[in-house]
Amino acid sequence: MTQQIDFTEAQLRQFSPKMQAGYRDALLAGKDILRRHGILDNGRHFSHFMGQFGGETDGGAIGRESLTYTSVGAIRGAWRARASKHTDAWIKANLLRNPVALGDWAYGGRMGNAKGTSDGYDYRGGGFLQTTGRAAVEEYCRKCDISIRPDILDDHAATLQFACIEWAESGCNALADANDILGISKAINTGSATSSVIPNGMANRERWFARARDIWWDAEPGTAVAVAPPPPAAEPAGSRKIVVANAGQVTAGGIGLTLFGVSTADAIGYGGGILNMVKTYGVEAVIILAFITAIGFAAIKYFTRQDFAEGRYTPSGAAK
């Protein structure tokens, strides 16, 4: 197999910030499926595929066709010929806010949907290319070795497979090479690239294709995708690293320690250094500083005792 292009989650988010997570996850997990169907052969194929996906689902914001209508006018606008046979009163009484009944009225008895059942509703448009009708779903399930079920079009991974089969069998890769967006749109929406029917939502398809083209059109096969380095492992709760550098370093003034990047001399000479240490490193710094201070006091006590014994030191308040 020749080298193919790749894509990232960041690019999918750039293409459509409102894309449902299910669609995004299915695309990222389904790269092998896209490759097998030639959709990742080059940037042209993937740009047109994503353009059609965007046009059908409003950039991945729509999962299923909504059959919940709240006005008679909307139903008449969507199904002019069918609605013309009924009065407003009949439509209002039987179809408004009744998606299962509307599905049977609009789709029952055709596209493989049995009349008088929930088939029209169950197999209403859904998924990457809004596959519609029980007959089409059964065919795709057979080709993918998937068992058909009423909610199959809610399964993003399954509908990606359906979309790839539809894309390849409709000759859309060749149409993408020719940059024939109208032919692709006809193939997806009407079932034939040579149909005389103008596809629904053509302007929307063109708009989403333009977004995809800006991201993937010039993608080069074999281009490595930059992967961010994994974040550092989180430290266990309550733990804290202790860094001791140059411990026991001999200096001209004696033995000095550099702890946490702050020398003991600086810390003792400047209260700010101690405060900094405590703020940054917490209780461990306090313990170590206390230990150092204790050693310091012991040393002072020892030397002053020697000085006192030899008459070189007079305590404060003593007679001179």
Image (cartoon, rainbow, N blue to C red):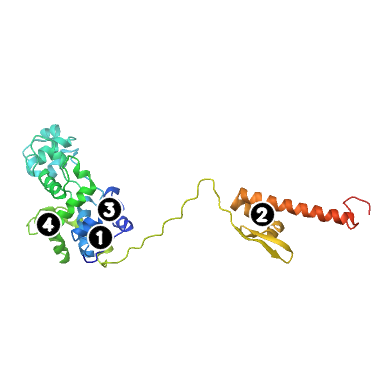
109 in relation to 171, above or below: above
Q: How many marks?
A: 4
Kind of element beneath mark 2: helix
Residue type at mark 4: give it.
Glu
Please tell me which of labels 1 and 2 falls first in the chain: 1
Can you identify the residue that label 2 sits on? 274
Q: Nearer the viewer, mark 4 or mark 3?
A: 3
Residue 169 disc label: 4
Q: CA distance from mark 3 to mark 1?
A: 19 Å
Q: Residue 169 location, x and y as percent?
A: 12, 57
Q: Residue at x 41, y 57 (%)?
A: 230
Please tell me which of labels 4 and 2 falls first in the chain: 4
Residue 212 disc label: 1
Kind of element beneath mark 1: helix
Residue 128 seen: no
Please tell me which of labels 4 and 3 falls first in the chain: 3
Q: Quadrant of residue 82?
A: top left
Residue 29 disc label: 3
Q: Nearer the viewer, mark 3 or mark 1?
A: 3
Q: Are marks 1 and 2 in contact (CB under 8 Å)?
A: no
Residue type at mark 1: give it.
Ala
